[in-house]
Image: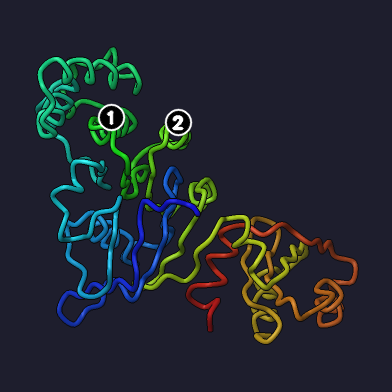
Amino acid sequence: MTELAIKAEHIVKRFGDFTAIDDISLAVPKGSIYGFLGPNGCGKSTTIRTLTGLLHPTEGKVEVLGYQVPKDADKLRLKIGYMTQKFSLYNDLTVQENLQFMGTIFGMNKKALKARCEEQIHTYGLDNLRNQKAFGMSGGQKQRLSLACATMNDPELLFLDEPTSAVDPENRRDFWERLFDLSEAGTTILVTTHYMDEAERCHRLAIMESGKMRADGEPEKLMDQMGVNIVEIKADDLRLLKQKLLQHGSHVRSAAQLGVRLRVLVYQHVSDPIGWIKSQFPSLQNAELTIARPTLEDVFVSVTGEGRQ
């Protein structure tokens, strides 16, 4: 049986009349990278804060690393790392001073703190920046420093709240390589994101909308279980074609233009989606229609918003 780092059952979090988390259950295996994908305001950050004990659930049961949350939240905090969406370190401190401060919070003695600071500076490529004050660093450099500080205590579980929202694609890719290194070493990672390509990197993924969990599973399996086939159409007048296709709601789940192609999600009860489209639109007889591989964006559209209507 897989050992779990996080086990949450029927979590509800209300703020007055507003329900930020609406009956969420999840199980996160140790050593895995588990992602929360969803738009801003869907409840991702509130879920993380509830799992760390920063917020108390209104209803439900939360167990993290064997600790009951929020009852054992103080003990749990020594075992976890937390990197917030916005840079939250001290701008007027240098790289080394920020690391030393974080280590002091975790009660490291002078010898252990010095060794750990050197290790983190080397691991996260901060050697030439150790005396640089944080306010003068680039977005990618701040990101590396934030991750170095979040892992100063060598946490068993690392929470990352949209950690790559302010960095360029190259730094995002490098950041994810570091996450895989941590995962390989046994650290469990829970990360929120609204980037589809990042979500596809996770071992397991939850899709959230309006405080609810709309889907949960391995990215490949979610794509396989969509219940639709994807047809890409290369033809003229794609905007008009999209409008007409969406009128066939019992057959077409959604349609979106990607450059010179229209990407159409056709329900699987249509046995020959290309043949059906051509039968409905004779002008497409000589157009280019191909079956395409599903993506996480297709999954996201299919389980949220208009995809559920």
Observer-nearest of 99 and 235: 99
Observer-nearest of 160 and 308: 160
Give the labeled residue for mark 1: 148
* Whether residue 94 can be seen here: yes
The count of marks equals 2
Residue 208 in which image quadrant: bottom left
Residue 132 in which image quadrant: top left
Q: Disc 2 residue type?
A: Asp
Q: Disc 1 residue type?
A: Ala
**Mark on residue 181?**
2
Give percent across and percent down for residue 129: 25, 17
Q: Where 226 sits versus 177, above or below?
A: below
* Whether residue 171 can be seen here: no
Give percent across and percent down for residue 157: 32, 44
Observer-nearest of 133 and 269: 269
Observer-nearest of 278 and 292: 292
Q: Where 235 sits versus 240, above or below?
A: above
